[in-house]
Amino acid sequence: MFSIIQAAGWPIWPLLACSIVALALVIERFSSLKAQKVAPARLLGEVLIVSRNAVPPPDVVAQLEQNSVLGEVLASGLLALSANPYISEADLRSELEGAGRQAAHKLERYLAALATIASAAPLLGLLGTVIGMIEIFGAQAGTGGGAAGGNPAQLAQGISMALYNTAFGLIVAIPALIFWRYFRARVDGYLLTMELAAESFLRHLNTLRK
């Protein structure tokens, strides 16, 4: 492996850095986008039961807020209603929508960085390819002849640099793109789930308003 890195030259180091960052982002997103941390299946039903007659006590609301991302959205409605029992439906909806936007921002965190790596890695590989080609032409120009008169060692080094960087750029970009699309679809699914849950919860909160 180290011999490949040596043959690829210095242009491969930014690609190695991108691969490490991409791997860290993928692991972090897998950990953060678990269903239990975002939108537990039974959470809405449990909250509807607990608040069927009145707003739950502050400690229960605080526990809900720490439960998951969906819990934060639902807790925002309970906190708004607790602060102002006469709050209008429009203001209550606004509170839930604001919490929803914050939740969306939290779920989409680092996805832009992963998409950037997926886009930049092939370009970095192409940069290494161009530098490798420059090495090849430099080896030929140094002898004043064609490929037959060129320095074989420099020619081999230039070709290796070009091919290794191209390949490594694609090796980094393809998984990054796949995981970005996977996480993007997962986040979209969670956002739809939370939107439907918030709409249902808003109707429930309207029955508690005075």
Image: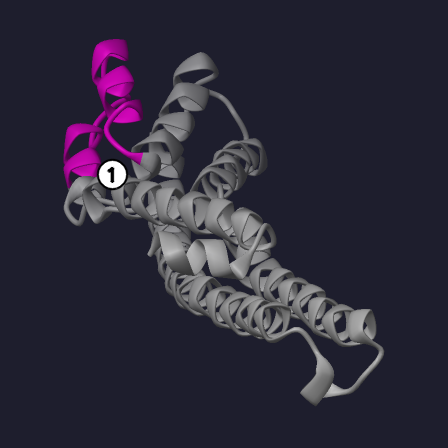
Q: Residue 56 magenta-drawn? A: yes
Quadrant of residue 63 within the rendered picture? top left
Q: Residue 95 magenta-drawn? A: no
Q: Where is residue 42 drawn, in percent x and y? A: 14, 46
Q: Is residue 2 left or right of residue 15?
A: left
Residue sitting nearer the eye, 155 or 82: 155
Q: Mark yes or no: residue 166 visible.
A: yes
Residue at 35 percent of width and 59 percent of height: 186
Quadrant of residue 51 within the rendered picture? top left
Q: Where is residue 151 drawn, in percent x and y? A: 66, 73
Residue at 27 percent of width and 23 percent of height: 66
Residue at 63 percent of width and 63 percent of height: 128
Quarter holding the C terminus is top left
Which residues, given as a range, are shown in magenta?
Answer: 46-68
Quarter holding the N terminus is bottom left
Q: Where is residue 190 drawn, in percent x and y? A: 35, 54
Q: Secondary structure at mark 1?
A: helix
Q: Amino acid at mark 1?
A: Lys
Residue that carries the numbered disc 1 in the rendered image: 37
Task: Classify 10 Å Cα crowding around label 1: few (below 14), some (14-19), many (20 and above).
Answer: some
